[in-house]
Amino acid sequence: MKTGVIGLGAMGANMARNLHRAGLLVGVWNRSTRKADAFANETGIKAYPDCASLARASDLLLTCVSRDADLREVVAAASPGLHAGALVVDCSTVRAETAQRIATQLAQDEIDFLDAPVSGGKEGAIAGTLSIMVGGDSEVLNRARPALEAIGQRIVHLGPVGAGQRCKAVNQIMAAGINAAVTEALAFAQAADLPEAALVEVISAGAAGNWFLQHRGLSMLQGHFEPGFKLELHHKDLEIAQAMAKSMDVALPLTQMMLEDYDQLMQAGYGSEDISALFRLKRRT
């Protein structure tokens, strides 16, 4: 299945590399031509001049962009090149309603759509071990599996279009709670003058162990917040979850607290750092 990738950020570029290794990648497009050209030079894969020409060359178009408006824009730009029977798989994190509207629009031209947000961080994107949360028709998912298996280790069908995004909202709410707990606990550990590496090793192996502690614990203790997942993007995702919760009359007090903390960090200029930058608010100064 000839696959094109739109969006070469930290996640999209690494997913594209894995599709290339699997022999599925036909081309890429990115808003910043510098990134697309660098990818083409690295891999020998063509960087297309626009979304429509990439769509014409692809059976499956995989999108991975930052925001709802970005997704609407690239799908609209690709649409003239999409043919009946083509498949668009979106791995972005957007509102479920956005995914549903795009699916309805594409269906008018007999183009299939899956919302397939991912989890596993930059590390999972590099290793091809992402968890993929899929909304859409199960038969369409079966067509997309070769491409999804190149980027992910676990592919789970959750229901119709929009279900993947609702599941991702659950993931992002939970990630916020883990971030709050880990940063608070490590601030306590630092104040207690415990040896950092030994602390992370022993806690990671016990009942409180988790991915975030294993992959971000030492770096945050050392004051390094290189983005694996940008704080400003998690803020955007939590706003999406909060809007969903409001429509269902569900309270998300921890999410509200995290949004306020993230607002404070973004105003201080830390929005482009990793979400572990929350440690800045918790550690002893």
Image (spheres, rainbow, N blue to C red):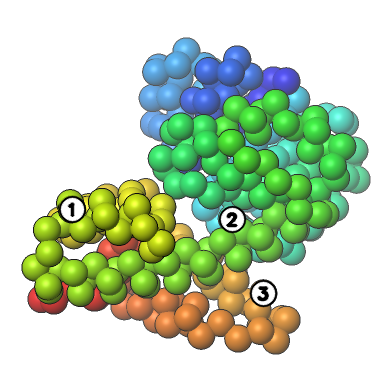
Residue, disc 1: 198
Residue 232 visible, this orientation: no
Regarding mark 3 in the picture, which secondary structure is present there?
helix
Q: Which mark is residue 244?
A: 3
Residue 282 visible, this orientation: yes
Q: Choose top left, top right, bottom left or bottom right for residue 261.
A: bottom left
Badge 1 crowding class, 10 Å Cα cut-off, few under 14, some 14 to 19, many 20 or more, is few
Give the side of residue 223 with respect to residue 164, left or right. left
Give the side of residue 15 with respect to residue 106, left or right. left
Residue, disc 2: 93
Q: Does residue 36 sit above or below 184 in this rendering?
A: above
Q: Which tag, 3 or 2, sits closer to the chain's start? A: 2
Q: Does residue 252 sit above or below 212 in this rendering?
A: below
Mark 3 and mark 1: Cα distance apart in space: 40 Å
Q: Which tag, 3 or 1, sits closer to the chain's start? A: 1
Return the x and y of residue 60 as percentages of the image width and height: 72, 29
Q: Does residue 190 sit above or below 220 in this rendering?
A: below
Q: Choose top left, top right, bottom left or bottom right for residue 282.
A: bottom left
Return the x and y of residue 72 as percentages of the image width and height: 67, 52
